[in-house]
Structure formats: structure tokens, C-alpha cells
Image (cartoon, rainbow, N blue to C red):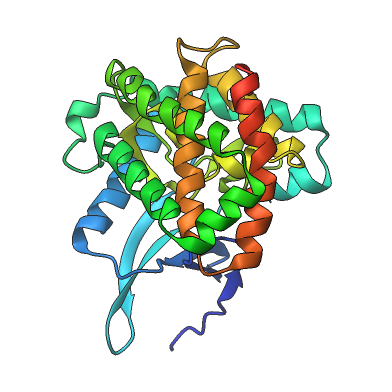
Amino acid sequence: MATCLKFDEILGGHSGARVFKFQMDHINYCLKIPKRQITEADIIKFQKICEIYQQTGIKSLEYLGYGYYGATPKAFYLYRYVPGYNLDALSEQTYTLSETHQAGVDAGRTIRKLKNYATSDIATYIPTDNIDNLTEDGNRLYAQLLNTPQLYNALCRFCNLNQVQLLIDTFNHATGTFRALTPQLIHGDIKCSNIIVDSVGKQCFIDIAAMKISYDVLNFHYQMTWNLLPENHKRRAFTKGFFDGLYDGSRPENFHQQIIYVTILNFLKHSVKFADDPQEIEWYFQKMQPVFAELLANTKTI
């Protein structure tokens, strides 16, 4: 007799992937369909990432396998459902500023375990960030910003061009700082919405496919500008807490320069992404101006 399964879509992600929860034999599972078609290499990589989290003792997804569906077969991942509460919702609705900071500390201490993982054994599966390529990409995006009339005009109206240029100079100078560091394993997309907190307060890291051999600040490659916006007090508290936990309350040499680097890279990518939306660009540039001023005036932003 065929079993009829009921699939409930889990909403709230921003990656474009679709995630469904279903139950079988009284056990809850998740089925994730990535936004883009995935390859056999992607499947092997995801399985390896899950193994790394298991080996390092970091609570994450229990990978069970993969499959295909549809007339034009599209792949999906299957893993055990993670019960608990999304830290993003907890921070917004329940946690105080201090509790959100402590959640960041806990996350940083946990992710610190990845830094001791031998990357030589996994370089075949996990991509390595090339800082020169990232910097080249940033400068290409900056040239595109300056040469796109709607972006450049908004930049002139809402931002201090001298400050922007100083930050771009720091961005380029920071490349040498990164070259002096040894890339290590990172989660790759740290944010409150990628952490589930269970009934006893233990954190579970999800959306783990962004793992890279890279640099600590690039854990916030996609989030840093949002985390620094003036009104996002709890996002900033979480980010500060993460680095407090990762570095045991201290900061490495030239850390602020690295913060500027990831903020500018994030800003440039967002700016070009929003180029066709004048209202979004105006809002974003107005919000970023005080962030730019603070980054230049305060060397202890995070």
C-alpha cells in the first residue's frame, strides 16, 4: 500500500531554495530543493560539509541522502528535521540586546572549532577564497558603480565621495593584510536566521552549503552592511558577540581594516544588484552614509 506524505513548506529563507517538512514513521524530515540545478559535485560537497560538522562536534544538519523529481529531473537534499526556534525570530521577538550578544558569543565559540580542521584534506571538496580575485571583483564593481548614472548620481546625493574613496583605498590596502593570514575553514554565511536554538538553548547551524576555506570576517560576506546599519542594534550586537566568542574577547591585528574590507565588498555587490531600483538605491545609500562615517572615525566598530 502506497504511503501518502504531507509536505509543509518552511518559509523565511532568502537563498531562493525551497524547504519542505514531512513526517514518516513518526519522524520529521526536511527536503530541500536548491534554487539552481545541483550537480553530482555539489552533492558530494554537501555530504562532505555535513561530515565536517559532525567530526568537529558542531551541531548541524544530519544528512540522509538526495534524490530527483519531475519530468526534467531536479535534485533535492534530504536531512533530519531540526526542531527548535530560529535565532532571528528569537532576537527580534524575545531576546534582549544582551541575550542577542551572548548568542553571538556562543556561535563564535562554536565556529572556532572549524579553525582547527585540516584544510589540506578537504581542498578538493571545499572552495578556497582567493583574496586577489575578491579585490579585483570589488574594484570592477566600484568602476561599474561610478559608470552607472543612476548609481553615481545617488552616490553623489547621499554619500560623501571623499569618504567612499578613502574606504576604497583601505579596501585595496587590506588585501596585503589577508595575504599575511592563513585561510581556514569558515561557515561562510553567519547570521541569526541560519541558527536554530533547541529547547535547551543549544545552537544548530543550518544553510551550511556556503562553507569555504577563507577568512573569519568573510563569514559575514553577505550580511555586514545590514548588520552595521544604525537601526540594526541587535544584528550588530550578535556580530560583535560572534567575534568576541571567536577571538575570546580580543581582536587580531588590523581587524578593523578587515571589517572595512568585507563591508565595502558587501556594499558594492548590493549597490550593483539594486541598480534598477531607484527607491531601494536611495534608501540604501542614505543608510550607508553614517556607516561610512563611523568606519572612518571609529576603529572599534565591531
Viewer-closest of 65 and 125: 125
* In the image: residue 293, left or right of residue 247: right
Viewer-closest of 46 and 184: 184
Query: Residue 118's quadrant in the figure?
Result: top left
* In the image: residue 48, left or right of residue 300: left
Image location (x, y in percent) of residue 223: 55, 44
Rendered residue at 48%/67% (across/down): 16
Query: Residue 176's quadrant in the figure?
Result: top left
Where 176 sits versus 141, above or below? above
Image location (x, y in percent) of residue 113: 43, 23
Residue 32 in view (yes/no): yes
Total count of labels: 0
Query: Residue 248's quadrant in the figure?
Result: top right
Image location (x, y in percent) of residue 228: 65, 36
Question: If the image is split into quadrants, where does the C terminus sit?
Answer: top right
Residue 11 in view (yes/no): no
Question: If the image is split into quadrants, where does the N terminus sit?
Answer: bottom left
Rendered residue at 25%/39% (across/down): 133
Image location (x, y in percent) of residue 81: 54, 57
